[in-house]
Amino acid sequence: MSAAVAPSATDRSDLRTVLTGGTRVGLGTAAAVVLYVLSAKDLPAGGGLRAGVESLLVLAAGTAAAFLPGTWCVARNVEGIAGAAAMGLWGTIVFSIVDIVLLRPLKVYPWTWDAVGGGTTWWYLPMWWILGTFLAWMGGTRIALRAARGAGRDAGVARSAGPVLIGALVAATLARVTGAAVLPPVAAGTGFALTLLALVLVALARRA
């Protein structure tokens, strides 16, 4: 009789983990998009309320997309980081399916980006897949690097995402104060991605 194989405690990159976690990330992203659209339609534009809510939704969705895959894969080495990236990619595919099959037929939002691609959705979908994979890859890498420095159980979402969120809020604040022609949610999202990349690069440089 063969012995049962116990699941790995770290660096989980098996198909079930990747597909299950990616599906949860994709459905969560779809929910965040719906909430974003509702806030854009129903909240007043003046006073900064709408911009604040939209920015918070972007940061919440970005945090989930970046750090949940690495947490669920328990990323500690290359295998876990790769699993996190694969989970992020699958999450973007799940969202794309929900977007095309459900959100668009229900006319949940006017997708003005389609006009840029001549009325098609396919020009931006590869960009979406790249972004989701990149965030999960960088998030998994940051979690693994923190664990390697001895962060241990503190290498999860809250501790790993904290400095990234601070960088995102600083970017959004600077954009608002300087009067830059950038929407606050866009500034917050860009600041989030760039801060995450910078922190990972600095941590890797210190290990070299």
Image: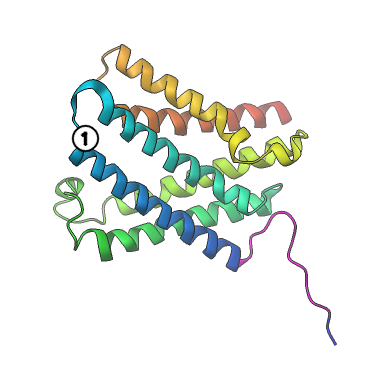
Which quarter of the figure has residue 171?
A: top left
- Of the pair 36 and 119, the residue shown nearer to us: 36
Amino acid type shown at disc 1 = Leu
Q: Indicate the quadrant containing the C terminus: top left, top right, bottom left or bottom right.
A: top right
Residue 107: image x %, image y %?
17, 57
- Of the pair 207 and 177, the residue shown nearer to us: 177
> Is residue 182 visible to the viewer in this orientation of the structure?
no
134 left or right of 172 in image: right
132 shown above or below 97: above
* Residue under the point 18% across and 41% down: 41
121 shown above or below 59: below
Q: Is 12 covered by the magenta stretch?
A: yes
Which quarter of the figure has residue 191?
A: top left
Q: Is 123 covered by the magenta stretch?
A: no
Element assignment for label 1: loop
Residue at mark 1: 43
* Residue under the point 42% across and 56% down: 26
Please state the extent of the stretch shown in magenta in the rendering.
3-15
14 shown above or below 199: below
84 left or right of 29 in image: right
Residue 5: image x %, image y %?
78, 73
* Residue under the point 85% across and 87% down: 1
73 left or right of 98 in image: right
